[in-house]
Structure formats: structure tokens, C-alpha cells
Image (cartoon, rainbow, N blue to C red):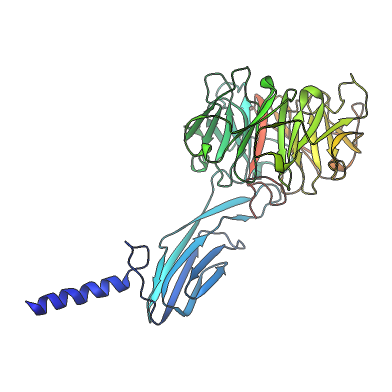
Amino acid sequence: MKQVWYGLLAVLSLLLTACPSGGGGVSCDPTGTGNLVVNVNGLPGGVNAAVTVSGPGGTQTLTGSQTLTGVAAGSYTITAAKVAQSDPLIRTAFSASVNSSPACVRNGQNETVTVAYSAIPSSNKLWMDNGNPPSGASPLLGFAASLLGSTATQSPSVSAGTVNLRDLTFDPDGNLWGIGGTTVDPTLVRYPANVLGASGSKTPDRSINVSGISCLPGAARLAFDASGNLWVSVPCANKVVRISAAQLGASGSATPGVEITGLNAPEGLAFDSAGNLWIANAGAKRVVKFNASRLGASTSGPDLTIQSQTPAPVINTLDANLLAFDASGNLWVMAFGGNVLYRLTSSNQSGSGNQTLTPSIQVSVPVSAVLEGMAFDEGGGLWITYSSGKFARLSSTQLGISSTSGSPTTPERIITSSSIGSAGGLALYPAPASLPLFHKLP
């Protein structure tokens, strides 16, 4: 009988020392050295992986498949970050799964781990919310970058049956967040990245009603800050509210933890690289800035107000509806009423109090344009909603030359689609790494 028990104990001892840490609290035998084989697959040629291996042998970063020989035995944690394939307009993003982590390297043995990358379905596309979609079209459209190389008539790559949307943006994982466009829709909805690779009816995996928004038409524009909090403008209530990253974690009702009040019909929102919040204070024809240090609590009264030297009531007195930063840190202001895009340089953005100026670059587009959305691409071009059934791209060169309403700038490429009704917000995933956007990738 003793021999049986001794045999069972010996087997149990072998099993315990063979298990990696994390397996029910059992430790991985750290005696000796072994080999860790990391196999990386799923990436196209020329795209480096971003795999981190951490354990008794230290920490290493791998850009592809590799065998780490003679490393100290013990438990190793393997993680893989998102990577992106270059593209002149919109990159393709890849996320990874690791089949075994932590992994146990045993004395004199090979331990193999597989890191499998796959393309994030929402990437490599320009997305728009589609108001008043024509018969058979959908409220959310995605156009692959391959369709956007020149002026053309195109059908969307993805026509998604979502709720009606008023604006949209992405998080770093490629999930799409939007504002419900009608009174029966939730204030905020999220559509996971994995359902955005093909057309068809879509069901949001998060639906959040924001309390304290009782006026109509309700929320208008949204923007993430660097911490993953979502900021929402409410023009009819003259305020901007913050929904925390924690509140975005599940469906339900959310009470804003921070409110910025005292505004006049605020619309577009944009964060700069320092975390300051810029607001298109549309009703006052102003652009206002709230310093990052003040955004942790409710507040009123901006740190900087920018207005134009052109006297009121001229329609383009710095009309401010939407905002976007370019790679050089210039703030672009889209004026719906005047069909103008203004460039505010870094020096224009400095200081405090009231600043009156004439933007050095003012790009007018044809009077037929309907400016409801804007987004910069990898090449520094600016995509804008253009007119019924169309959106367009202003090249970086065109953005450096002022034009007037009498001689407007015609975008260097215009995309026409019978699926587009009234194009609204524009967004692409991933955002270029040079932009101060939450959904950028390196």
C-alpha cells in the first residue's frame, strides 16, 4: 500500500512542477534553462509584430517569429499589441490573440506559443453616418480605402443597418460609437469592431442613455479624450458633458460626472495633444478652449476665446461648427453657414482671454457643399461631406492655399454614391498616429 501512495505522490509532484504559474496558483519550476518558441502568423509581409515576452529571463520585444534559446526556466507572460499596415489614406489595423500565456519554460525543453494576428474589420475604411438614406441604403456606410484613390462613383464596402446616427467616432479597439439620431434611440450606442466587416443588420452591444438631456434635438457631437472618457455636446442645452470610461463599460443610464456650461449652442469637439478641450461655440461664432487641468470637474467660462476680426453680422464671422487637428497641430474650423474652412495655427491657439484674429488660411468650397463632417487621413488630406450623394477630399496642398467664395476650391477628388442621402459625421479607423485622437495607433 505504501508503494502505491509513494507512486501517486511522485506523479502529483511531476504534475505540479510542470504547470505554469496562474494554473490554480501552482508555480512553474524555475530550475535550469529551456527554449521558448514564439510563432507569429497572420500579418502581411513588411508588417512587424509587437510581441512582448516577460519572465525570469527579462523582457524582450519581438517583431516576428523567434526562438529564445537558453532562457531561464519559469513562467513567461506573452502579450501582443495592435499593429497597422501602412496605406496612403487609411491603414489596416491588426489585433492578436495568444494561445498560451503565461507559458512555462522547463529545463531542457521547448515551450511553443502561437501569436495569431487578424485584421480588425472596421479598419482601412472611411465611415459616415447617413441621414435620410435612399431606399435600400443604410444609416451607416463604410468605404474601403481602395475605393478612394481618385474621383469616382462607388458603392459602399459596408452598408450597416444600425440605429439612425447623428455623429460617430471610434475607440482604440475599432469599436464604433455613435449618437442615436432620434428621440427613441439611446443617447450613445456602440457597435463592436467584429460586426463591421460586412453589410447587414447590426445590433449594438452597448446602449447608454445620458441623463439630463431633455431638450431637442439633444446630443450632437462627440469626442474621446486620451483617458477614454467620452465628451458629448448638447447645443439645445448649451453645455458639453463627460461620460467616464467606467460608465461606458456597460449598457444602462449614465449621469455625467462633469458638465461644461455657459456655452452657446456648442457643436464640434476636439482635444489637442496636451489634452485641452476645444469647442466650436457655434451660437456665438467663436472657438473656445478649456485647459486640461480644469476638465476633472464641472466648470464654466473658457480659458481662451477666439473670434474673427470680420465684424458681425457677416455670415462667416468665424462660424464654428466642427473642429479637427492636423498633424502639424493646426486647428481646422469648419463653418457650415459660410462653406469655409479656417486654419488656426499653434500661435493662434496660445494665450488666454479673448483673442481676435483673421485666420491666415481660409479655404472656401462651392456653395453647393453641405459641410457636416470632416476627418484627416494618413496623407494629410481632409475628407469632408460635400453635397447630396457625395463626399470629397481636399489635398494637403489645397489646404495651404486660401480661396474665396467667388473662386472656391474644388476638392481634388470627389466620391459619388447612390447610397448616400445626407452624409453627416466622418471617421476613419485607425486614426493616423500623428493626430491627437484616442483611436490612433503607432
Residue 179 spot, x, y in % from top left: 59, 29
| Front position in the image: 41 or 372 | 372
- The quadrant of the rendering that contains the N terminus is bottom left
Q: Is residue 103 above or below residue 128?
A: below
| Front position in the image: 243 or 60 | 243
- The quadrant of the rendering that contains the C terminus is bottom right
Residue 376 spot, x, y in % from top left: 73, 42
Residue 203 spot, x, y in % from top left: 47, 32
Residue 428 spot, x, y in % from top left: 65, 41
Q: Residue 141 is drawn in which quadrant? A: top right
Residue situated furthest left in the rendering: 1
Q: Residue 314 is drawn in which quadrant? A: top right
What residue is at 41 percent from the left and 77 percent from the top?
Answer: 73
- Taking the image as shown, residue 301 lies to the left or right of residue 68, namely right
- Taking the image as shown, residue 237 lies to the left or right of residue 356, namely left
Residue 21 in sight = yes
- Taking the image as shown, residue 409 lies to the left or right of residue 37, namely right
| Front position in the image: 304 or 188 | 304
Residue 374 in sight = no
What residue is at 42 percent from the left and 81 percent from the top?
Answer: 33
Q: How many marks?
A: 0
